Image (tube, rainbow, N blue to C red):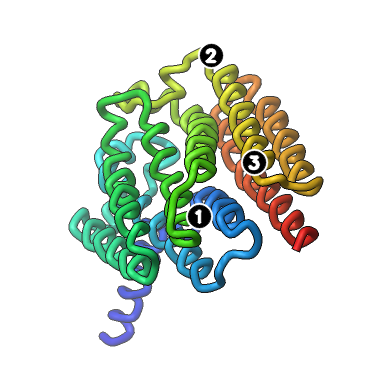
Amino acid sequence: MAEMRRVDWRARLSAWARLMRLDRPIGIWLLMWPTLWALWFAADGWPDPGILLVFLAGVVLMRSAGCVINDFADRRFDPHVARTRHRPLATGEVSPGEALALFGLLVMLAFGLVLLLDPLVLRLSIVAVVLATVYPFTKRVTHLPQVVLGAAFSMAIPMAFAAQTGEVPRLAWLLFVTNLLWTVAYDTEYAMADREDDLRIGVKSTAILFGEADRAVIAALQALTLLGLALAGHMTERGLYYWLGLLAAAGLFFHQQYRIRHREPEAGFRAFLENHWVGAAVFAGLFVDTLVQS
């Protein structure tokens, strides 16, 4: 009997971990990289180690919470989509009540971390949680849920500036908008993989909205992302290595355009995954530039 209970708990923990997508960390990276950009820009050098640790933990918690509430909202749609039909809520491994309890726990842990920081961060974090909670439900009412996701993913940027400096300057909002545009670009690639299923079940997305103009719009958003990062680099007088990081990011964007040239679902998903390396390239350039200038 004791052995049976241990097996059950292992199964439960495995299901909860998969519900949080801990087995698919791409979302953690896509949230982590702009958070690190913001911390390094805000510090104009090396960020406070304690603040850095809080944000690293917060990224994991909030991305996990976002995945849980997303799957709760999509629990009746996911069984009808090839890519999502094996998720724990779709298969019944996890109940809706369990999912909501897990979401609440993750958000409370994240709020506990925020209480260690400047009071302004707490106010901004409330906006972040509202956006993360609302995002999954916007797929029913607008073709622009990716914009809401972009805003949710970008809230870590003003929060990082507030934690590091006690204020949210224009540079923070420039990075906020830049990251929002990047998020819409890569999540449109992600939505291209599900476009046919989404059309069939009535879920809305920018991939459906843009139609045959999807590649052109993604390219424009990627160009604006690079422009925003270039403006941030100019405002803060970044050196050669930062610009090399942007050049590498531009090369990766070109490769993504090549991948999605035939609009194949798998190619869209692969292009989406490559954005991890875009964020890493920008941060690597920023990090090395800071190292050289310090």
Which label sits in the foreground, 2 or 3? 3
Q: Is residue 45 above or below residue 280?
A: below
Report whether 252 appears left or right of 157: right
Work out whether residue 4 or residue 80 is closer to the camera in this orientation and state it. Answer: 80
- Numbered-mark total: 3
Three-letter code, disc 1: Ile
**Quick one: label 1, few (<14), some, or many (20+) residues within 10 Å?**
some
Instruction: Say which element carries label 1.
Output: helix
Q: Which mark is residue 28?
A: 1
Q: Residue 36: which quarter of the image?
A: bottom right
Instruction: Say which element carries label 3.
Output: helix
Report whether 251 appears left or right of 217: right
Residue holding disc 2:
213
Q: Is residue 66 above or below residue 271?
A: below
Name the residue rendered at 44%, 38% in the picture.
150
User: Residue 131 location, x and y as percent?
Assistant: 31, 43
Could you tell me which quadrant the C terminus lies in? bottom right
Q: CA distance from mark 1 to mark 2?
A: 29 Å
User: Residue 94 location, x and y as percent?
Assistant: 27, 58
Q: Residue 166: which quarter of the image?
A: bottom left
Three-letter code, disc 3: Met
Residue 29 visible somewhere in the drawing: no
Residue holding disc 3:
235
